[in-house]
Structures are given as structure tokens and as C-alpha cells.
Amino acid sequence: MSATKSKRQIGKQKQQSVSSASWNFPLDSHNYKIIGIGAIVIAIAYGLMSTAISDDPTQWNNPLAVTIAPVLLAIGYCVIIPYGLLARKKETAEISSES
């Protein structure tokens, strides 16, 4: 009595179809330009802030360093940089007419 053994695939795995996932970096040149503008605004603010440094304690600090520089820093860090990270470039929608 001979029993037929079924052929097993020992050590072999079934080949599964792998779908290739396309991943694009979320930031493009539009975002980098906005972030660059934010970095320039922040650099200007730090430059203005450095003008208030003086060795004479009786000398009044530069008003630009006391008022304008903190405002520019807040705008740069809290408005421009986050907008540059979150902004999407508006794409023109192409309307295709099917007839």
C-alpha cells in the first residue's frame, strides 16, 4: 500500500505582490522660500537686538532693539516659519471635457 505524499513547500514562502508606495517629500521650493524669508526676518531681528548692547549703564537702549526686534522675532518664529511648513502650493485645476 503506497501512500502518495503531497508535495509541500518547506522553507519556501508564497511570493506576494508588493505594491510600490510612492512617497514624496512634503516640502517643495515654495515652502523653502517662505522658510527662508522667515529666517531672514529672524536674522534682522537679532541684528537689531544686538544694537542695544552698550557699556555705559546710563545710556538708554536703542528703541529698535527694545520694541521692533521682539515683534519681528515673534512674527518670524510664530507666523512665517509655521506658515512655511504648513503651506501648500495652489495648483490649477485642469477641467477635462469629455464628449
Image (cartoon, helix red, strand yellow):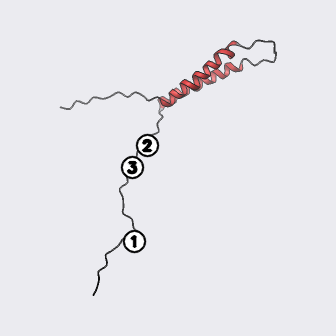
Rendered-image quadrant of the C terminus: top left
Image spot of residue 94 (x, y percent): 30, 29
Image spot of residue 55 (x, y percent): 81, 18
Check disc 3 and report the residue beneath it: 20
Residue 17 drawn above or below residue 31: below
Check disc 2 and report the residue beneath it: 23
Q: Residue furthest left?
A: 99
Image spot of residue 87 (x, y percent): 46, 28
Pointers 3 and 2 in contact (C-beta within 8 Å): no
Please tell me which residue is depicted at 61% across the width and 19% down the height of the picture. Answer: 72
Of the residues shown, which amino acid type is indicated by label 1? Ile
Of the residues shown, which amino acid type is indicated by label 3? Ser
Image spot of residue 81 (x, y percent): 55, 27
Check disc 1 and report the residue beneath it: 10
Rendered-image quadrant of the N terminus: bottom left
Label 1 and label 2: CA atoms lie apart by 36 Å
Q: Secondary structure at mark 3?
A: loop
Label 3 and label 2: CA atoms lie apart by 9 Å
Q: Residue furthest bottom?
A: 1
Please tell me which residue is depicted at 35% across the width and 56% down the height of the picture. Answer: 17
Horizontal side of 17 relative to 36 (left or right) equals: left
Mark 1: few/some/many CA within 10 Å (<14, 14-19, 20+): few
* Location of residue 16 (image quadrant): bottom left
